[in-house]
Image (tube, rainbow, N blue to C red):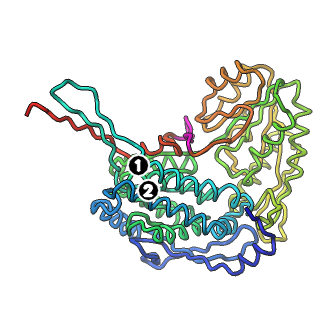
Amino acid sequence: MTLHTLDYWQSQAAALRPEGRAYIDGAHADAADGATFEARSPIDGRKLADVAACGQADVDRAVAAARRAFEAGAWSALAPRERKAALLRLAALIDTHKEELALLETLDMGKPIRDALQFDLPETIQTYAWYGEAIDKRYDEIAPTGANALATITREPVGVVAAVVPWNYPMLMAAWKVAPALAAGNSVILKPAEQSSLSAIRLAALVEQAGIPAGVFQVLPGAGPVAGRALGLHPDVDCVAFTGSTATGKRFMTYSGESNLKRVWLECGGKSPHIVFEDCPDLDRAALIAALAIFSNQGEVCIAGSRLYVQDGIYDAFMDKVARHAAAMAPGNPLDPATALGAMVDERQTRSVMARIAAGQAEGARLRVGGRQVRADSGGWYIEPTIFDCAGPQGALMREEIFGPVLAAQRFATEDEAIALANDSSYGLGAGLWTANLGRAHRLSRRLRAGLVWVNCYADGDVTVPFGGVKQSGFGRDKSLHALDKYSDLKTTWIDLTV
């Protein structure tokens, strides 16, 4: 894959004129009241577009269109092979336009262009293609009954699905929800984060080009407390699939209870432990992965390995290795293919992370590397990779999700202590451990309270395996065939064969 040069991407960015209107019932549209908000790039503060700020009237219109399309069977009753062909066309169109979409991602939320182009877009394309291929390969069931009856168990689409996604992986997080929801036969309304709406709006045009009928896929940009809340409370939305903060996830649960008891699937926050034992098979590789696990995507990752636990005998030497990797990951222009660490998503997130860094120092944690906001002359928002040595588990650095390039490290002595520290969290999304002891790997994988466990690696995965957490990291799973269950109802039909 060609990464081009900084000059190339800057020229492409200068020529870009992003669409900012919503996509409702098969056409782009302004918000009903004409309201907009500015999309500004965290790279340098430049204005990218005026984006429609959708409200209640727009949500009502989109939900009505989604319901009409669903009841008419324009998509829900389409033959599986035809839905499959449409999703495969969509995957191919995303592939054709991957440079444009990667550029929109980078400009809108600040991630390095090389990450958008080499990771986000390929996995997005794979997700749509994989779920497209899955459509005509799932069979319904016949239950074992007596000779005088036939009992069938069939999967049916739930209806209207609202997919509410975050700003850290806009295209990919949308794909994880939109692809299985469409594959199951639903109508989908995508509500992107205010900070990263542009790629979702561009996706709508590709969906239309792929031949997916009007009303089946729509995009409603807007503020979470307005458009997101309206979707959560709408009595004709059957399901909300949400990725974002735990606090917002709890609000969607409340919205469900206050409205129609719509099902709600949550992938929320994380404070994932990363454990390194003295018998780690490759300390150099583990140190590199430990740095990447927290600093990739500027630390704006739900599964970031933000709590690092290192066994006493190797702590100092190992942390020196991690610190060297961190020091080499200086923030740079995200449009430069050589940049490994890009811009924070916006001023608010930057100030939040810097406040957490200051609080950590005030609590007595030792600042080993970083801790500064940098590149102020760029007009953008950048923070150095930051590492703290922490004396105990009770400080905010060890307990609160920071969502930035901040690593909190602590020593441990025994296996039991490592597990106690790792599980001492309200979150339970991911966990990693490094050991050459196969028995220990199995024991700890079972004892760790997390939806995802990695052994001698971190954040590895594929569309074929489920992704999700436990405790206050949420419930339900994205990816894999299991994700289709979130967007399907089981129907039992009992037929008396004696009649």
Kind of element beneath mark 2: helix
- In the image, the segment drawn in magenta is 464-474
Please, is residue 238 above or below residue 282 in the view?
below
Q: Which residue is mark 2?
A: 84
Badge number at residue 136: 1
Dominant secondary-structure state across the stretch colored magenta = loop
Residue at 39 percent of width and 49 percent of height: 256
Q: Position of residue 409 (x, y in %)?
A: 80, 36
Rendered image quadrant of residue 78: bottom left
Residue at 87 percent of width and 37 percent of height: 284
- Earlier-in-chain disc, 2 versus 1: 2
The amino acid sitting under disc 2 is: Lys
Q: Are marks 2 and 1 in contact (CB under 8 Å)?
A: yes
Kind of element beneath mark 1: helix
Which of 12/42 is in front? Answer: 12
Q: Position of residue 110 (x, y in %)?
A: 71, 63
Q: How many marks?
A: 2
